[in-house]
Image (cartoon, rainbow, N blue to C red):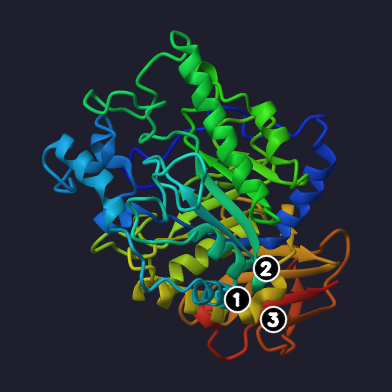
Amino acid sequence: MAEKLRGDIEQAAGNINEVLGNYPESKLVNEKLQWFEDQKLGVIFHWGLYAKAGIVESWQLSEVDDWARVKGRAWREDIKDLQKDYWNLIEEFNPSNFNPQKWAKTCKDAGFKYMIFTTKHHDGFHLWDTAQSDYKVNGSRSPYKDDLFRQVVEAFRAEGLGIGAYYSKADWYSDMYWTDKEGVTQRRADYDPEEKPELWNKYVEYVHNELEELTSNYGKIDILWLDGGWCGKGKEDLRMDELAEKVRKHNPDLLIVDRMMGGRHENYVTPERTIPAFDQIPKKSWESNVPLGKNWGYVVNDIFKPSKEIIENVLEVVGKGGNVILGVGPTAEGEFTPASLSILKDLGTWLETVKEGIYGTRAVQSALVEGNRWVMTQKDGQYYAFYPLESGEQRLIFPVINIQGKAIQTITALDNGQEIDFLEKDGQYIIHMPHREFAWQIAVFKITV
């Protein structure tokens, strides 16, 4: 499922199965992870200056990340012209059609239960009113004079969705991280923090102050989603233990996702653009990240996945016990693309009929075997079975003779409550399909034992 030639798919640096140890926050975090696993479906917004340029987030600024500029993708032919023109997009980014209430209603109707918003990508452009930098919406050079993060948070909270903040630990605009914009630019700081500890400590203070703002000034925050896996440990030490205490001051059960770093501050893991195979399902809480198109942010002429593929992705992840966040890239004007809206409408319509078997469920371990086409979930003593149909199938073989030692009593179609005839034979259940169409050719059943 992962695309080739992309350089933005980071590899895990730590043990993704390492469970949370005995720390002061452990009890609250473990309780919050149960809430998280109940939600199942979230949306992540990548939005910023790169939407104005119509390019793959801010990756083209990094000279060594030439993968983002191959095959005619380069926004400008000369890298220094590209960087200069990109930095100046702050003077043009003015989402005049932005309607956060419309965003929130659309996402709620699509079945999302939580939202993660990109407050700052690697380019350093802030989508909130930070006191740490003028490179921000409502800054002196910005024509937009409001706090985008606050508007989004208030609208989504009003619709009852959980709130998450994406934040890149790297900041390529900051003179404390990229000190020489005329030199060769790369992902990391362009100096050795061990050789310039005073400068690096200023940068650490800058990051801490910003994250304290995000977790103190916007009410309840559920998830702090930290990106930039090359920054935070080793030479680029961000003093994460100290930082975690600060950001949990007003949000004691905050989930911190120091993604790809492992250990104490990666409360759940985030496989990107992929769904784990049966033998690779993480032992700790997890969340697959899937963009609706090929790109996370708005890219001109992006190619979007069919609704059926997105629905099948959601179903596979939930059946394997994970969450999924779907990536939506709004335009520079602040609107969802027609392709995104079409997918979200289809997803919401399908989820409305099968939501009982999706939200708040857990995986059925006996169903997690290679070659099994059945997707199963369980909740409150009930079991739910989903089956992607081949054309014309009317007789299904259900491979599990009993569930936790109990025989099946009834099977009903989850989408309309119709009781389904079945027969036990030779250690299997034979389900006789009703002669009708199931949405997206996915048969859905509620099983009572």
Q: Residue at x 61, y 30 (%)?
A: 262
**Label 2 Cα neighbours within 10 Å, binned few <14 / some 14-19 / many ≥20:** many
Which circle's residue, 2 or 1, is located before the other in the chain?
1
Give the mark count: 3
Nearer-N-terminus badge (2/3): 2
Q: Which residue is mark 2?
A: 358
Query: Alpha carbon of mark 2 to alpha carbon of mark 3: how far?
Result: 11 Å
Q: Indicate the quadrant where residue 430 lies.
A: bottom right
Residue 362 versus residue 429 in the image, above or below: above
Please give the residue where the numbered disc 1 appears in the rendered image.
Answer: 351
Amino acid at pointer 1:
Leu
Look at the picture and state if 173 lies above or below 407: above
372 left or right of 421 in image: left
Give SS at disc 2: loop
Of the two numbered discs 3 and 1 in the rendering, the one whose residue sits closer to the viewer: 1
Residue projecting furthest to the top: 195
Cα separation, mark 2 vs mark 1, equals 8 Å
Asked if the residue at tag 3 contacts the one at tag 2, i.e. Cβ–Cβ closer than 8 Å, the answer is: no
Confirm or deny contact between disc 2 and disc 1 (CB under 8 A).
yes
Give the amino acid type for the residue marked by disc 2 in the picture: Ile
* Mark 3 and mark 1: Cα distance apart in space: 11 Å
Mark sitting earlier along the chain (3/1): 1
Crowding at mark 3 (Cα within 10 Å: few <14, some 14-19, many 20+): many
User: In the image, 295: left or right of 386?
Assistant: left
SS label for mark 3: loop
